[in-house]
């Protein structure tokens, strides 16, 4: 008799694109605004240059899944995760659980605030269902785990990349979630701390309902995941076994590595 596995998130035929005319030549908002005012007709009638970031994505993630997403930079990995986490445009994704997403340890910080204050803000955003006392315990635990107590009350802008990674990783790896999204969470951390936090993250993963894990480290994918999704040019080209998924990634996305 086949066992039933609860659906955590379901995506059907989802596409995401944007108009490249707003991104060419590193234009900022001011430049775009000036162009629109100076030549409104030309600006409004110029041909769209659509970039398809995600194309007809179909995906169902079940309780117990540890999904590793592989793909080169620009393949749509982070965009897909942002959509699942509810950080992008409105979609009709079916989500039956709360989502905790850690999309980048270097984004979302307040440089003028201290490390402790950044941890407090992050904990408040991630753990909305917890009481003030429970949140305070997580903050205290994160400060201790980070091993940078002597700098924790100094401005975040003065931290090294490794210290920033330690600060965020300590806060985000405290408690499990129904759906946990981890996007290159070890980026920037020094070797010793990466090993230390990896042990803590793996414990959190083991207790979470389902996990989406993005990493360029194939050893981490092999060790953590039980399913692999390969994204290439915005499309899912493989969804299944970890070993076969890594083979597909190397063959289709990184042929220079598959020949080594």
Image (tube, rainbow, N blue to C red):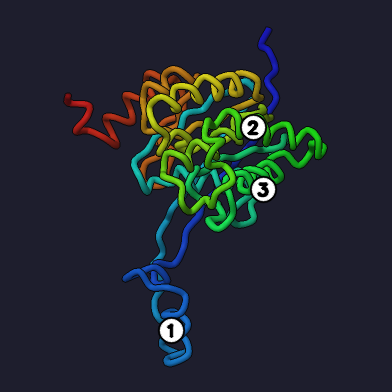
- Mark 1 vs mark 3: in front: 3
Seen at 72% across and 39% down, the residue is 127
Q: Which residue is mark 3?
A: 121
Q: Are marks 1 and 3 in contact (CB under 8 Å)?
A: no
Mark 1 / mark 2, whichever is N-terminal: 1
Q: Is residue 180 visible?
A: no
- Mark 1 vs mark 2: in front: 2
Please rate how many residues cluster around mark 2, counting C-alpha atoms within 10 Å: few if below 14, some from 14 to 19, many from 20: many
Seen at 37% across and 38% down, the residue is 71
Whole-percent x and y of residue 97?
A: 72, 34
Q: Secondary structure at mark 1?
A: helix
Q: Are marks 2 and 3 in contact (CB under 8 Å)?
A: no
Between 168 and 205, the residue placed more toward the observer is 168
Q: Is residue 15 depicted above or below 43 in this figure? A: above
Seen at 42% across and 23% down, the residue is 220
Please rate how many residues cluster around mark 1, counting C-alpha atoms within 10 Å: few if below 14, some from 14 to 19, many from 20: some
Q: Which residue is mark 2?
A: 179
Q: How many marks?
A: 3
Q: Is residue 254 visible?
A: yes
Q: Is residue 252 depicted above or below 53 in this figure? A: above
Left or right side of 169 for 195: left
Q: Secondary structure at mark 3?
A: helix
Residue furthest out toward the top? 1
Whole-percent x and y of residue 232?
A: 37, 41
Q: Which residue is mark 1?
A: 43
Q: Secondary structure at mark 2?
A: strand
Residue furthest out toward the front? 150
**Which mark identifies residue 187?**
none
Left or right side of 8 for 46: left
Quadrant (top left/top right/bottom left/bottom right) for the C terminus: top left
């Amino acid at each position: 008799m086949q066992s039933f596995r609860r659906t955590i998130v379901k995506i059907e035929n989802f596409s995401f694109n944007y108009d490249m005319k707003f991104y060419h030549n590193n234009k900022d908002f001011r430049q775009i605004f000036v162009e629109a005012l100076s030549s409104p007709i030309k600006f409004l009638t110029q041909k769209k240059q659509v970039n398809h970031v995600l194309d007809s994505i179909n995906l169902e993630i079940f309780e117990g899944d540890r999904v590793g997403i592989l793909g080169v930079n620009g393949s749509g990995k982070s965009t897909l995760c942002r959509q699942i986490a509810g950080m992008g445009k409105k979609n009709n994704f079916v989500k039956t659980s709360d989502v905790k997403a850690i999309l980048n340890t270097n984004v979302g910080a307040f440089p003028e605030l201290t490390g402790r204050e950044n941890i407090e803000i992050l904990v408040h955003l991630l753990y909305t269902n917890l009481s003030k006392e429970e949140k305070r315990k997580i903050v205290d635990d994160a400060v201790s785990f980070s091993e940078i107590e002597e700098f924790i009350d100094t401005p975040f802008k003065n931290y090294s990349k490794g210290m920033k990674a330690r600060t965020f990783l300590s806060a985000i790896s405290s408690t499990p979630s129904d759906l946990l999204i981890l996007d290159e969470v070890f980026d920037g951390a020094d070797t010793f701390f990466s090993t230390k936090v990896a042990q803590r993250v793996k414990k959190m993963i083991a207790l979470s309902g389902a996990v989406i894990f993005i990493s360029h480290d194939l050893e981490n994918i092999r060790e953590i995941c039980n399913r692999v999704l390969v994204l290439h040019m915005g499309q899912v080209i493989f969804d299944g076994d970890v070993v076969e998924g890594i083979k597909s990634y190397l063959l289709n996305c990184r042929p220079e590595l598959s020949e080594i």
